[in-house]
Image (cartoon, rainbow, N blue to C red):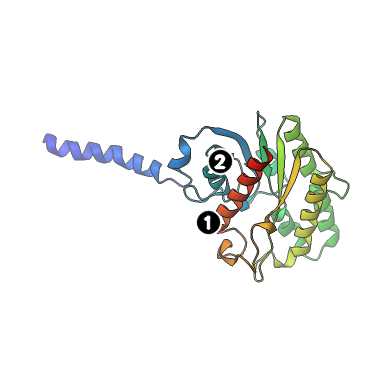
Amino acid sequence: MNKWYVLPIVLLIVAVPAYLFLFDEGYCPDIEEMADANIQVIGDSVFGSDADGCASIAGFMSLRLELRVTDHAIPGATVIGEDGIPSQYVSGDWEWTVIDGGGNDVMAYCSEDDDDECDEKLDEIMTNDNKGLMPDLINKAKDDGSKVIILGYYGIPEGSEFEGVVLQVEILNDRYNEFAEVNDDVYFISLKDVMSPEETPDYYSDDLVHPSEEGHQAIGNHIADFITNSG
């Protein structure tokens, strides 16, 4: 074979994997070379862990802090269950752990007319007297020396599939807030302070459930600023 034909083929073989790596979902060249922030996030699809490039909440936190935030959140994750959000937690020398969760559990158990089952599942996540899976998870992180931020969900727009469970989402928000108020090194951030259907509709994706890229950026910056100002 003529050597001039060989060279383009070799370049193609090298270039295709490189292209796929560079433009793989989640790849963000601005973050790859950053030092670790000793911050991990765990939770559900609010974090946008399946977003392209830098466009997740952890990505925007990293860009704001100029330190790489570790993202263990899984879209669709519930608090309850063998593979629930508590199983995402990786023990380590974390300075901060940022957690959300419960919305998918609410949709699974509270969207029907079985109030008893709904109440039981809400209590399994967190009771009024601060017991349950979420307190256990937070205390596990604290035992590792981590400070914990627990997020409250943002307002639900009209037409969202979550519109029918607004009350139950608010119950979780209230319980998370009350837990933070009575526990050292636990902080509650309400995402209602960042976005709302009335004031920032562009922060919601077209499905009226998840944040848009603009929403992810606003949330990521807000959390990063909170961490910076709490240092």
Residue at the (48%, 45%) spot, across then down: 26
Quarter-of-image position of residue 224: top right
Residue that carries the numbered disc 1 in the rendered image: 213
Which one is in front in this view, the residue at disc 1 or the one at disc 2? Answer: 2
Q: Is residue 154 above or below residue 32?
A: below
Left or right: 202 in relation to 14: right
Circle 2: residue type: Leu
Q: Is residue 78 above or below residue 15?
A: below
Quadrant holding the C terminus: top right
Q: Is residue 222 above or below residue 228?
A: below
Left or right: 190 in relation to 67: right
62 or 164, nearer to the observer? 62
Residue at the (52%, 44%) spot, across then down: 63
Residue 82 in sight: no
Residue that carries the numbered disc 2 in the rendered image: 65
Relative image position of residue 89 (x, y in whole percent): 67, 37
The answer to whether marks 1 and 2 mark residues whose Cβ atoms lie closer than 8 Å is: no
Q: Quick one: label 1, few (<14), some, or many (20+) residues within 10 Å?
A: many
Quarter-of-image position of residue 115: bottom right
Relative image position of residue 182 (x, y in whole percent): 84, 43
Element carrying mark 1: helix
Element carrying mark 2: helix
Quadrant holding the N terminus: top left
Relative image position of residue 86 (x, y in whole percent): 71, 40
60 or 1, nearer to the observer? 60
- Circle number at residue 46: none
Residue at the (70%, 67%) spot, across then down: 163
How far apart in space, not on screen, are marks 1 and 2 (Cα)? Answer: 18 Å
Residue 211 in sight: yes
Relative image position of residue 170 (x, y in whole percent): 77, 59
Work out whether mark 1 precedes mark 2 in sequence or the reverse, and give the earlier one: 2
